[in-house]
Amino acid sequence: MAEFQTHEHDVIVIGAGGAGLRAAIEASSAGVSVGLICKSLLGKAHTVMAEGGMAAAMANVDDRDSWKVHFADTMRGGQYLNNWRMAELHAQQAPDRVRELEAWGAVFDRTKDGKILQRNFGGHRYPRLAHVGDRTGLEMIRTLQDHGIHQGITVYMEHTVAGLLKDGNRVSGAIGYDREKGVLRVFRAKAVVLATGGVGRAFKITSNSWEYTGDGHSLAYEAGADLVDMEFVQFHPTGMVWPPSVRGILVTEGVRGEGGVLRNKDGKRFMFDDIPDNYKPQTADNPEEGWRYTQGDKSARRPPELLTRDHVARCINREVKAGRGSPHGGVFLDIAWIKEKISNAPEHIKKLPSMYHQFKQLADLDITTTPMEVGPTTHYIMGGVKVDGETQMSTVPGLFAAGEVAGGLHGANRLGGNSLSDLLVFGKLAGEHAAKYAKANGAGQVHQDQVDAAAKALLAPFERGANAESPYKVQYDLQDNMQALVGIVRKEDEMLKALDVIEGLKKRAGTVGVAGNREYNPGWHTAFDLGNLLTCAEAIARAAVARKESRGGHFREDFPNKDEKGFGTFNHVIRKGPDGKMQLVQVPLTPMPQHLKDAIEQEKK
């Protein structure tokens, strides 16, 4: 029997990004004991990589904005598969969460009259993203941590959670290990909040950091919770493809929000070739002369580069496949053109300090004079744990989820900037209701057989040794397979092939071995991550095969159109069947109340 250390809290929060920190703060403020577990060091959450801003209808730049417009934009971007209650709460509460963050010490960029400045972003009708240059996520984490350290939260840094413990139907805790020393740990808890982020490391090219191995998705699935919308993966249009020193680094949508344009190898601004009728560029060859987005009697400045991310990514993909791409398989993102048109161009461009400095330092690339080579990169998954819109509780009692690991808010496609306000709004709600659940329910039993089984599975790779299958090779083959067969453009025969490959990889993952001991052993960490990655990859592929239409982040070459009467009426839900195999079911959309239908119709006029 493996030795382990035991810790006990009312609420355990797994993940210390924006959602996890906000949940921990809220739960602790309710007077319960909170344990915060993070896979990396505190402060290194992937949230710090979010650059452009947080979407909130504060109307500081355009007074026509309102929560109803934000709600309508979010629903339209999500192709109306969203959990409408989550979209409503998000739009209504985001301004308060931004102001709260400001009250806690966040330093936002300002308008001339001292209000929080807001910028344009893809899919948003009006300038809506409150920002701190292009370091908004970093400022969010700094502020939440500075505020959180006074809340009496116990932090477990560099810990991986390997499984959730259950007492009957409800969650009763978690088991994991200390990544530094390899000590096994049991966490007893009355409620658990998942805030573990996304699944990007299942793909070869991704903007996601090493932590994003689908841990929360897999933990919830194995515990019996439903996953929803797993077919919808967002490929951010602009990740760096060259030089090699910056390959994969995301170029924030804020670059396009501040005037950056996309050009092919011939210098043509190709986004004008495929835009909706309500975009009216004055002169495509002279983008500085302006462009207008119109809907009914409403009009707003917005370039076609700020169409939704799935649309822009497919347009870039089209140019590359047609042979009009850049020398290294992307296109050019040009903000340097501004230098020829306005006198304060360098200062304007340096409103994006991280973009300017990181590329100058890492690649000797001056974005004030030279276009960037960019292309689509796996960025975000709209799918995740199916939660109640009001409480963020999953279908397993006592298990909550917030942030990217939770599905529902974004539907088929996420609008840029909605992710950061999502973290704040639903992190708060998850923490609040997890604390209420913990107060209303006593501690569940921790069953020794579950602990022993989890510990045995964790330590199995050491028994197989270094001569067994390499975990790195299995992970590489999975990433290669997902990138090639379940990527930005999908076909049924390729995805069925991917599922066959995944089955083979699952068998190989069960034979991987590692050498050495448990201290500082990255091979062991990778061996464990494989199970989570494979679960998420299978869920994505199965849901994508089943959705025989194109919608949002899911584009089928063999079914290029939307099917509003069929696939537009339900979500795909993934769950673990009684036989242990993955099941997919269709769950009808919950009818939307009339006042929200009216809000959407009003914004269409």
Image (spheres, rainbow, N blue to C red):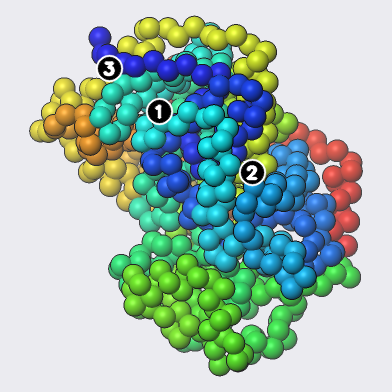
Mark 2 and mark 1 lie on one chain; the one further toward the N terminus is 1
Q: Secondary structure at mark 1?
A: strand
238 over 273 or under it: above or below? above
Q: Which amino acid type is shown beneath numbered disc 2? A: Leu
Q: Write the residue at 54% across / 64% down.
A: 134
Q: Is residue 526 visible?
A: yes
The number of discs equals 3
Q: Which residue is mark 2?
A: 424
Q: Secondary structure at mark 3?
A: helix
**Crowd class of label 2 (few under 14; some 14 to 19; many from 20; radius 10 Å):** many
Quadrant assignment, res 370: bottom left
Rendering coords of residue 39 (x, y %): 39, 37
> Which numbered circle lies on residue 456?
3
| Quarter of the image that includes the C terminus | bottom right
Q: Which residue is mark 1?
A: 161
Looking at this rendering, what residue extends furthest in the front direction?
150
| Quarter of the image that includes the N terminus | top left
